[in-house]
Image (cartoon, rainbow, N blue to C red):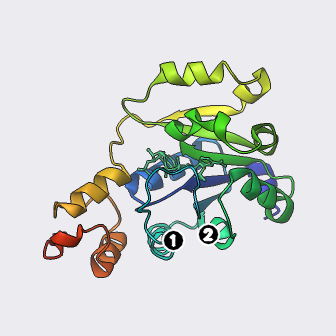
Amino acid sequence: MRNLQKHGIGVMGGTFDPIHYGHLYIAESSRCRFNLGKILFMPSGNPVHKKRNDITDHVHRLEMTRLAIAKNPYFALSTLEVDRPGPTYTVDTLEYLKNDCSGTARLFFITGADAILDILTWKDVPRIFELCRFIAVTRPGFSFRALNEMLADLTEEQRKKIHLHETGGILVSSTEIRRRISRGEPVKYLLPDSVEKYIEKQGLYRHPDDSCLSLK
Ligand code: NAP
């Protein structure tokens, strides 16, 4: 990990339910733009803040992520959050990475700008900003007004640590993929073939009444 000290490490935090080409593109474009030496994909374990109570078992989310990133030597999977018992708090993850893995490497936490809007509700916000910078990824339709309102509540130092990464054309979302699969609609070219095959084999995201529907 020594050479990463000059490049920085990207931590892709999210539910990845399922992972798709949008996530992979965001990770790769962040790596290039922010000169990151490695991207750690960090599927969340027990996200206490989630309103959805039907999050797919972490065994499947980990395996789909492993399959999706297999061909990129700069990408790695971290099981840190799913291995840790109890609720998932980003501050604990960053603390661990800072102490055990990265030494003095800069950490960049990459996630959707929508998630960043709620950052003031996260555990130990001051410490989080000491430990990392954020790459906040915006998609078409993102509310910059809401972002500006939130930024006004941060300190100047904290504001400087949020880097916006606008990905104009990417409309794919995990929610849309789950919806399409539950209706038997195609998801080809929205996510890697290996992930699509895994979903099909495991029968994920199908509504119980739709068991006869195929992904094809
Ligand atoms: P999420 O539901 O997976 O994502 C929220 C939004 O951001 C969705 O639109 C999602 O799109 C998008 N997204 C997810 N991961 C992304 C990534 N790496 N890059 C770009 N866009 C991404 O995630 P979440 O539950 O809001 O949480 C995001 C991260 O923040 C997680 O790592 C979570 O642990 C952390 N978090 C921590 C706390 C805390 O410490 N208290 C509280 C909230 C969140 P898709 O649906 O297409 O993925």
| Front-most of residues 95 and 140 | 95
Q: Which mark is residue 112?
A: none
34 sits left or right of 5 in the view: left
Q: Quadrant of residue 123?
A: top right
- Name the spot of residue 33 as percent of width and height, x first: 59, 41
Of helix, strand and loop, which one carries label 1?
helix
Amino acid type of the residue that numbered disc 1 sits on in the rendered structure: His
65 sits left or right of 163 in the view: left
- Name the spot of residue 31 as percent of width and height, x first: 59, 49
Which numbered disc, 1 or 2, marks the residue that appears first in the sequence?
1
Mark 2 closeness class: few <14, some 14–19, many ≥20 residues within 10 Å: many
117 sits left or right of 176 in the view: right
Q: Quadrant of residue 196?
A: bottom left
Gap in angstroms between the C-alphas marked 1 and 2: 7 Å
- Which residue does the image show at 29% across and 81% down from the upper left? 201
Mark 1 closeness class: few <14, some 14–19, many ≥20 residues within 10 Å: many
Q: Which residue is mark 2?
A: 82
**Looking at this rendering, what residue extends furthest in the left direction?**
212
Which quadrant is the C terminus positioned in?
Answer: bottom left
**Looking at this rendering, what residue extends furthest in the bottom direction?**
201
Q: Which residue is mark 1?
A: 58
Amino acid type of the residue that numbered disc 2 sits on in the rendered structure: Val
- Name the spot of residue 186 as percent of width and height, x first: 18, 61
Which quadrant is the N terminus positioned in?
Answer: bottom right
| Front-most of residues 137 and 71 | 137
Kindly check if marks 1 and 2 are in contact, taking CB atoms under 8 A apart as contact: yes
